[in-house]
Image (cartoon, rainbow, N blue to C red):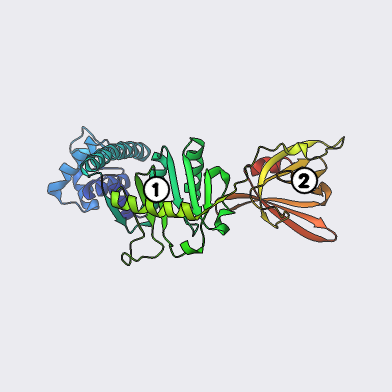
Amino acid sequence: MKSEDLVSLLTEFGLTQYEARAYVSLLELGRANANQIATRAEIPRPKIYETMQSLIDKGLAFATTTTPVEYIANDPEKVVTMLSERYLKAAERLKVLLANLKAKQQAQIVAEEIIFTKNEVSLIQETKDRILKSQIKIEIFDINERILANEDIVNLLATKKKEGVFIVIYTIDLVAKKISHEITSEIRTVSSEFYTFGDTYLLFDNNTFVIWFSTRGVSNSYVGCYGSLEAVNKLIKFFLKVAHKESKLHRISEITEVDPLKYVKIVSPEMVIAYQKISYIEPKIINYEQPYSAFMIITSSRIIFLSVYGNDSKIVAIPRPFVLYVTPLLVNGDQLIRITYMKVGHYEEILVKVRDPQAILRAFI
């Protein structure tokens, strides 16, 4: 790494240009007096003693008792540790100060407000914050599957439902079929009359709202708005009231906990080594619609794929000698397992999403 790069990095940790250049030069020289350091670091001589004293005060250098005085650089590892600790402490302090400033600012904002944003990341964060703060009810109108396609938001909705928050989702039939019962208390499907409303509305505890714009009609760059302006709240409430009146209740099929071994006959001396809940990726070896439970069961002689939907079940079994490869994959953050096996003289593959790929792999050792 070039000296200039080292100097640049040190300045990021709070050193001045003179201090950073002096410390790097001193490391290169090993031991040197002020004039030698000033020459190598290109620091004006009237400034060199002030700079070296600052390095000593910060613990980055030491002065000898010789005449003339010479300087020795502190060990780089110790310096990095010291600077890191100071940096982290400063960051924590900054975090507290900024939080206090934000709290004061929010205290000054009147209750009725609406904020337009051009930043989609900010809009998503505001949505998540309001979901977290909801205590009673969340209403969502989303026909374009924008909210429901965000994994973080879906996980938060599932958490709030478990906490007892009543969640209603208004959407179209096509989207309703994809929604898990785990994230909503009630799904209501709307007719084509509502298709013209491309915006996504969220109302939290009948108090605050978030709107995701479908088109950037307010300006060429706004992506949405949020706040607690009573006039907007009334409009959203009225709109959702109409949607509720004109919508149909979509039946949600609850998934009960399934014991996969109840559906599979294990013949002695066959032994179950491991099983795990999965999601099929490809091919679609089942024809059930969501929601269903699927499992991968590994025994001493077979790999069994079990799918359960209500009172129906389907089993696909592959003899272990026919299995050629079991490969772990990481795709878009999802942990997958690919099973390659022989079927009637040609290769076939099954790709599934699993929670613990290592447990699956250990079962084949």
Is any atom of residue 325 visible in this view? yes
- Identify the image quadrant of residue 272: top right
Instruction: Report the number of numbered marks.
Output: 2
Residue at far left of view: 46
Q: What amino acid type is highlighted by mark number 1?
A: Leu
Callout 2: SS: strand
| The C terminus, quarter of image | top right
Question: On the rendered structure, is 34 left or right of 150?
Answer: left
| Residue 241, percent from left and from top | 42, 51
Callout 1: SS: strand
| Residue 341, percent from left and from top | 78, 54
- Identify the image quadrant of residue 27: top left
Residue, x 56% and y 43% (percent of image)?
182
Compared with 271, 8 (above or below) is below
The residue to which callout 2 is attached is 304
| Residue 328, percent from left and from top | 65, 49
Residue at far right of view: 268
N-term-proximal mark, 1 vs 2: 1
Q: Residues within 10 Å of mark 1 (few under 14, many from 20)?
A: many
| Image marks 1 and 2: residues in contact by CB distance under 8 Å | no
Q: What amino acid type is highlighted by mark number 2?
A: Ile
Front residue of 326/32: it is 326
The mark closer to the camera, 1 or 2, is 1
- Identify the image quadrant of residue 217: bottom left
Is any atom of residue 226 visible in this view? no
The residue to which callout 1 is attached is 203
